[in-house]
Image (spheres, rainbow, N blue to C red):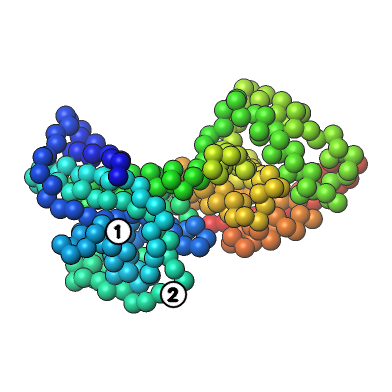
Amino acid sequence: MNLIKRITDSDLFGGSKEYLDQVSRYAARGVLINQNLKICLIYLKAKDIYKLPGGGIKDSESADEAFLREIMEETGYRAEIISNSGYIEEHKVKNDFLQRSYCYIAKAKDEKGKTDLTDKEKGNQLKFFWTNPWQALNYLKESVNKCNNYRDKFMVYRDKIILEESLKNLKLRIKKSTLDDTDILGQIHARSWQHAYKDIIPDSVLAEITAQKRATRFKKAMLESGEKNYLLLANNQPVGFTSIGRSRDDDLSDNIGEIWGIYLDPDHWRKGYGSKLLNWAEAELKSRGYKSISLWVLKDNHQARNFYEKHNYHKEGRGETITIGNKDLEKVRYIKS
């Protein structure tokens, strides 16, 4: 296994890096995903912090056996390991304790049994739940920021690093677009409009929408207004993007963010990528301090409306009429708290 990182006191508290020589404990831990690529996150209610599944390796077992056992004990799920991510070390100089953890990605099987928690885990009121990868990462980042306990701070920082590394191995990531990405933004935007708005927007208008024209528009917006778009890449190939920011509506307060748009290349529809972009956008807006999220949808775009309603967005009173070509179209606003 490759080394992911050696965590030292300096990573969390500043000062010079100091390392320990003797391993005090070997452990196995990592990321558990389900069929929908959601992440299993463990919440320690008594401490109000989050972690990944895992724990110490017993004398009679291998690291991968230990991880599968820990998954079963903490969640009740049987699982299978699909890859290893490497190993990570925690050099806790203050406690003279070096822990080496072997890290894996595992997939949960459908059947679920009973958990088998230790007294300590019961005392911490351990619970697990499934969430999208970026919300899981956000929970871990929040735990790092608010945790003051020396040992626990190492734990949640370690698990944040493990999840970040695992997301790379899952080959699913989101990046902020640059001027070099305007051509692909234009291509995705044009193809998305031409397929999603067929029979809604006049054909004459859709025919005028080209990848080149859209790319020019994105480049201008980035240069003049600082518009930020975020590309979703699967196996390093762009499949869609989203644009987010503060709500642009005058009647909404400053603590409401807005998803300005989500666009997927039609070749990648119905593969779960739209939900992943939406989940990431929501997590990112919440990390910026927004309490609620708004978005606008064409009233006749029933596919998009069903998608957002499935993700708990609710249509509220405000609507607008816009003219595209020679056709008047109604927009409706959705809000999610």
**Local crowd size for mark 2, using a 10 Å CA cut-off: few (<14), some (14–19), many (≥20):** few
- In whole angstroms, how far apart are the C-alphas of marks 2 and 1? 20 Å
The residue depicted at 17 percent of the width and 32 percent of the height is 17
| Element type where label 2 sits in the image | strand
Question: Mark 2 or mark 1, which is nearer to you?
Answer: 1
- x then y, percent, for residue 303: 73, 57
The residue depicted at 75 percent of the width and 41 percent of the height is 191
Q: Mark on residue 187? A: none
Q: Are marks 2 and 1 in contact (CB under 8 Å)?
A: no
Which image quadrant is residue 185 in? top right
Q: Is residue 152 above or below residue 115?
A: above
| Element type where label 1 sits in the image | helix
The residue depicted at 20 percent of the width and 59 percent of the height is 56
Residue closest to the eye, 184 or 244 = 184
Residue that label 2 marks = 111
Instruction: Decide if residue 130 is on the left or right side of residue 151.
Output: right
Residue that label 1 marks = 64
Q: Is residue 258 above or below residue 40?
A: above
Q: Amino acid at mark 2?
A: Glu
Is residue 40 at least partly visible in the picture?
A: no
Q: Is residue 133 above or below residue 179?
A: below
Instruction: Decide if residue 175 is on the left or right side of residue 316.
Output: left
Residue closest to the eye, 315 or 139 = 139
The residue depicted at 15 percent of the width and 53 percent of the height is 25
The N terminus - image quarter: top left
- x then y, percent, for residue 299: 77, 55
Mark 2 / mark 1, whichever is N-terminal: 1
Q: Is residue 141 above or below residue 48?
A: above
- x then y, percent, for residue 151: 18, 50
